[in-house]
Image: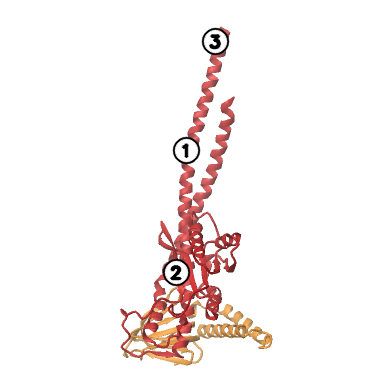
Chain colours: A red, B orange
Amino acid sequence: MAGNGSMQDIKRRVRSVTSIEHITSAMKLVSAAKLRRAKTTFENTREYFHYVTESIEDIFNNVNDVPTKYLKSDREITTTCYIVITSNRGLAGSFNSNVIKRAEAEIAADPEKPYIIAIGSKGRDYFRRRNYEISGEYLRPPESISFIETHDISKPIIDLYDEGKIDEVVLIYTSFVSSLEQRVRTLTLLPFEIGNDPDVLPFEKQVEYEPSTEAVFNYLVPKYVEIMIYGAIVESATCEHAARRMAMENATDNAQTMIADLNLFYNRARQAAITSEITEIVSGADALD
Amino acid sequence: MANSIRLEIVTPERLFYDNRVELVIVRTLTGDEGFMANHAWACKLLDVGEIWIQEAGSKDFKIGAISGGFIDVKTEITIFTDAAEWPNEIDVERSKSHKEKAENWLKTHTRADADETEILRAKVSLNKALTRMHVAAGGARRKR
């Protein structure tokens, strides 16, 4: 009988879609919990960022003998270092591909050989598959990274910048707009673009720098890079969970629609089978008369 | 009561402290230094060390451990540091094991067979462990 085979198939599909739905809805709950935690960390860090950036701007506006190697105008840019922040896990909708797409566009627009640092395995795998040279990779889970650990990421970057091997440091990551919206952001960390901003008034008082202006400055700039990288990792982790939560919610919804459709097909097939069976019995009985 | 000034201590992970204080003593790269209200404006780098805070209207000092950073003295004082801890947050056992590890490492390595930065790192780690232990024990040297 024709109906039987397809009824079996439909039943099997309903079962598999149901178990997928269980998994996606569980993942959705997990992501929602992780998102909440990541968001708290993210909000804490963002609140305190401005202290360091403000201090650096203060020094810029008040000191004449700032080491100029960190200023934009004094440096010809040839080699650019791209820091691409992705996640280590998939199933987060277009989260990783958005970052990767932007990074690839930036790198393609750059005539010089890029210097790529991948944070997160998804970005690393993508660029490695396409035979880009990866100069550095950091694959620790982003939600458990501590500020001290980001030092290992930023130190080599600062060293290379000081040595003149790279002339520009660009950070590509996902920034958090809301739980429903995340946007890919490109941020130039070094050299600084802040010049002598005429809007910012110089201090009316002399500021003591100790041990020396240069020492303070040479401490603050790497710290700034470190903080920005740490902040971007924390923000990106928050976005990852938000994106995954959305993706899993959509998947769960889709699974439910699919189950409803399949059940409809199943019932139709069942009815068709019954109808044809009755027809057969009736025609069989008719034939006996 | 002496004049007080607002002190904020910020780490990348949290706001460690925010209150009005009479005096704050920190270790700068050139030595221990105390800051009170109406101090000349300054921006100084800090070493790993203890921080002593005398809150407005209080005789006692609050003690904490901080690991480097900088202090920004203007109309308020802001201290930015990589990590800061109160005595009750310090795991003494862990600090002890860190101290021993760093000491042993320094005993077995000399400038001949180790990198300059590695020796420096071990020294900083030793210093951090010592500071934590001192702070946990209620502060090392200055007692009032």
First in sequence: mark 1 or mark 3?
1
Give the SS element for disc 2.
Answer: strand
Outermost residue on the front side: it is: A111
Distance from the alpha carbon under mark 1 to that under mark 3? 39 Å
Q: Is residue B84 visible?
A: no
The quarter in which the N terminus of chain A is drawn is: top right
Local packing at callout 2 (Cα closer than 10 Å; few below 14, some 14-19, many 20+) is some
Q: Are marks 2 and 1 on the same chain?
A: yes
Q: Is residue A136 left or right of residue B11?
A: right
Residue A286's label in the rendered image is 3
Local packing at callout 3 (Cα closer than 10 Å; few below 14, some 14-19, many 20+) is few
First in sequence: mark 2 or mark 1?
2
Q: Which residue is mark 1?
A: A260
Check contact, mark 1 vs mark 3: CB within 8 A: no
Distance from the alpha carbon under mark 2 to that under mark 3? 83 Å
Residue A187's label in the rendered image is 2
The quarter in which the C terminus of chain A is drawn is: top right
Above or below for A13 versus A64:
above
Above or below for A96 versus B111:
above
Q: Nearer the viewer, residue A277 or B129?
A: A277
